[in-house]
Image (spheres, helix red, strand yellow):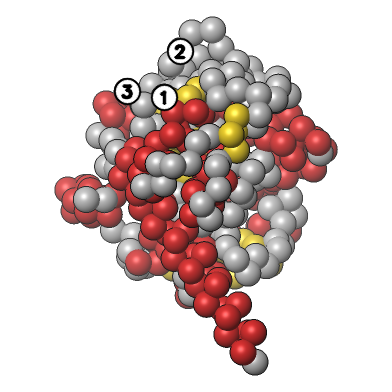
Amino acid sequence: MGGAGYALESLEMKGFSWKNKRVFITGCTGVLGSWLTIRLVEEGAEVIGLIRDLVPKSYLNLSGFLARINVVRGSVTEYDVIERALNEYEVDTCFHVAAQAIVGIANNSPLSTFESNIKGTWTLLEAARRVGRLERIVVASSDKAYGSQDILPYTEETPLKGLHPYDVSKTCTDLLAQSYAHTYGLPIGITRCGNLYGGGDLNFNRIVPGAIRSVLTDEDPIIRSNGTPVRDYFYVKDAVTAYLTLAENLDRSEVRGQAFNFSQERPISVLEMVSKIIAISGKTHLKPNILGKSLEGEIAHQHLSSQKARALLSWKPQYSLEEGLKESIEWYKRFFGSRKNEQRARSRE
């Protein structure tokens, strides 16, 4: 079972093919960007990836797919770089997923977050407007753009009112994308996803990769909070299919300029998530280590309704939470295993 089979069926039904499409991806070495880039290369697209810093441990690099794309070096905030790339590579599709995506970093360094997430978005969209050739643009917003709300789940009609730095940056990203779609007619679709997880995420401060690393090293996973915050957890392969599905439908007037929630629609607490990772790993002798700290700048409870995406895009997740976690654990097993083998080889030199 998996997202690939569903996506291929969708493409055949619609007669859409990514073969020879010229696709520009910002943030292509991030977790989502890596999986999205790999999928598009496999589908036959000509991918152009924007890379600010070389990330040797990114999944895109480790997989060998970095060598199979065209690389543009620069920042998403550099207008001349973006406009040149869109023009010279005759880009017809853009996935704007570059962002400073770590809430803790955003709280500690708001200016760099605003620069990357807000200025980066208007830079990309203005370049796309000036070039005038793009047929589809997908902009990554977030469930955090909604801020903290009393009524759950969030629907697309829920007001956008982020208050903390990361949330504000995504509220602004979302509104900028809506502005360029409705004022200038750019073919934009906006994604608002739950908390992404999956292989390739090496930020071990996040609960899923952190807990998986702990169980694989036979240590009790650490929960910094009291374990009660509730989230949607969204497997990266399902996210890739969601992004592609939205892009494929941007020729429809009822889809252009619209935002769509994408999630598993199975909200669970942090403690439940960690307990599930322990159970799936088979390390049932381990127990969550709950620190009970108050996490500043974190929203206590949030989850999404994906009814609009189901109805308008005929989209639904193809992986259960358990399936996504099982695949993720296997990915990290291979990752840590290859690192150990590499270290052993070096020790023999």
Q: Residue reaching furthest bottom? A: 349
Image x and y of residue 85, in percent: 62, 63
> Quick check: marks 1 and 2 in contact, CB under 8 Å?
yes
Image x and y of residue 154, in percent: 46, 17
Q: Which residue is mark 1?
A: 267
Point 22% across, 50% down: residue: 1
Image x and y of residue 64, in percent: 48, 74
Tell me the SS state at disc 3.
helix
Q: Which residue is mark 2?
A: 152
- Mark 2 Cα within 10 Å, few/some/many (few <14, many 20+)? few
Tell me the SS state at disc 1.
loop
Q: CA distance from mark 1 to mark 2?
A: 11 Å
Q: Is residue 18 above or below residue 66?
A: above
Q: Nearer the viewer, mark 3 or mark 2?
A: 2
Tell me the SS state at disc 2.
loop
Q: Which residue is mark 3?
A: 307
Q: Which one is in front, 74 or 204?
A: 204
Q: Which one is in front, 71 or 219?
A: 219
Q: Amino acid at mark 3?
A: Gln
Q: Amino acid at mark 1?
A: Pro
Which quadrant of the figure has residue 122? top right
Report the side of 274 relative to 27 (left or right). left
- Mark 3 Cα within 10 Å, few/some/many (few <14, many 20+)? some
Q: CA distance from mark 3 to mark 1?
A: 15 Å
Answer with mark 1 or mark 2, whichever residue precedes in sequence: 2
Q: Amino acid at mark 2?
A: Leu
Q: Residue reaching furthest front? A: 285
Point 40% across, 41% down: residue: 284
